[in-house]
Image (spheres, rainbow, N blue to C red):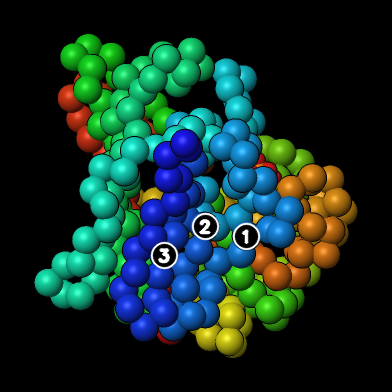
Amino acid sequence: MAATSVVVLDRGNNTTCTINLHGATVVSWRVNNQEQLFVSKQAVFDGKKAIRGGIPFVFPQFGPWTFGPQHGFARIVRWNLEKAPERLASGDVEAIFSLMDSDFTRSIWSFPFQLTYRLILREKELHSNIAVYNPSKDTTFSFNLLLHTYFKVPDVRRCQITGLQGCTFLDKTSNEGALYQETRDVVTIGEWTDRIYQNTPHEHIITNVVSGRKMRIQKCNFPDTVIWNPWMDHAKEMNDFGDDEYPNMVCVESGHVSSPVILLPGMAFEASQILQVM
Ligand code: BG6
C-alpha cells in the first residue's frame, strides 16, 4: 500500500493547507473555504514530475541546471513529515517537513545537507520558515532557494503588484543577461512575463486576487522576487498547464536566486515568507 502523500493542516472555519510530500509542495491553501493558490487542471501527480501549481520548493538551483533538473531536485523528491500537524496554544496549526541528501541527490549534487520547512497556518496567513543546514565538517556549498508560489487570480490583467519600483530586474523573455530598472509604481501583466527583480523590499501586495481581495507577501532573507506568467503561447508549450489557464494565475516568487547563498560547514541559513489575505 502506498504511504500517505498528503498532509492537511486544518485550522477550523474551512481554513486549511494541504501539502503533498512530493516536493513538500503546498497544493492548497484555503481561507474560509476560498482557495488562494492556483494548481493547473493538467497538473501531474505521478510522484516524479514537479507539481504544476501551488508552492513548489526550488532548491538547490533556480532555472536550468547543467547537473540536474530545472529548478533543482527538492520539488521532485519525497520529503519526510518531521512533525505532524499540531495545534498551537494560539489556535494556529504547525507542521514540519524535512529533506536530507540521499543517493539520488548526491548523484546530482554531491553535498550533504539538511532542509527543514516549517509551515504555520494562521487565520488569514500562511507562514513558511526554511532552514538549510550544512552538516559537513570541511566542505562549503552554495545554492539557490525559492518558493515558486502560484497565486490564483480571477484575471491576471487586473492585478497590480507593488514594491518593485526602482528595482533592477533581469528580463528572461528578452536578451538574457540584460538588466533593466523598473519605473512603474505598480507592475501589471499583459503578456508573457518572466523577470527576476533584485534586492526587492520585504513586502509586496498583489491586488485583485480571489474575491477581489489583496494578498500581502512578506519575506525575510529572500532578496529577489520573480514574476512569471507564461501567457498563451508558452502555456501551450507546457503539457501540464491548460492552454486557457494563464489568466487565472500569477507567480510571485520569493527567492535567493540572482546570487547564490554560500554556506560554510556547520552553518545554517534561514529564510521565511508570510502570505496574508487582506
Ligand atoms: C519561473 C522561471 O520561476 O519558473 C521561468 O522564471 C520558468 O523561466 C517557470 O519558465 C516555470 O518553470 P518550470 O520548470 O516549472 O516549468
Q: Which mark is residue 212?
A: none
Q: Position of residue 49 (x, y in %)?
A: 63, 37
Rendered position, 103 above or below 146? above
Among the two numbered marks 1 and 3 on one chain, the one whose residue lies closer to the N terminus: 3
Q: Which residue is mark 3?
A: 17
* Cβ of mark 1 under 8 A from ligand 1: no
Q: Which residue is mark 2?
A: 27
Q: Which residue is mark 1?
A: 39
Residue furthest toward the left?
89
Q: Residue at x 53, y 85 (%)?
A: 213
Give the secondary structure at mark 3. strand
Kindly check if marks 1 and 3 are in contact, taking CB atoms under 8 A apart as contact.
no
Q: Position of residue 85 (x, y in %)?
A: 27, 58
Q: Is 50 situated left or right of 133 in this image?
A: right
Amino acid under disc 1: Val
Q: Is 18 situated left or right of 52 in this image?
A: left
Rendered position, 118 above or below 145? below
Kindly check if marks 1 and 2 are in contact, taking CB atoms under 8 A apart as contact.
yes
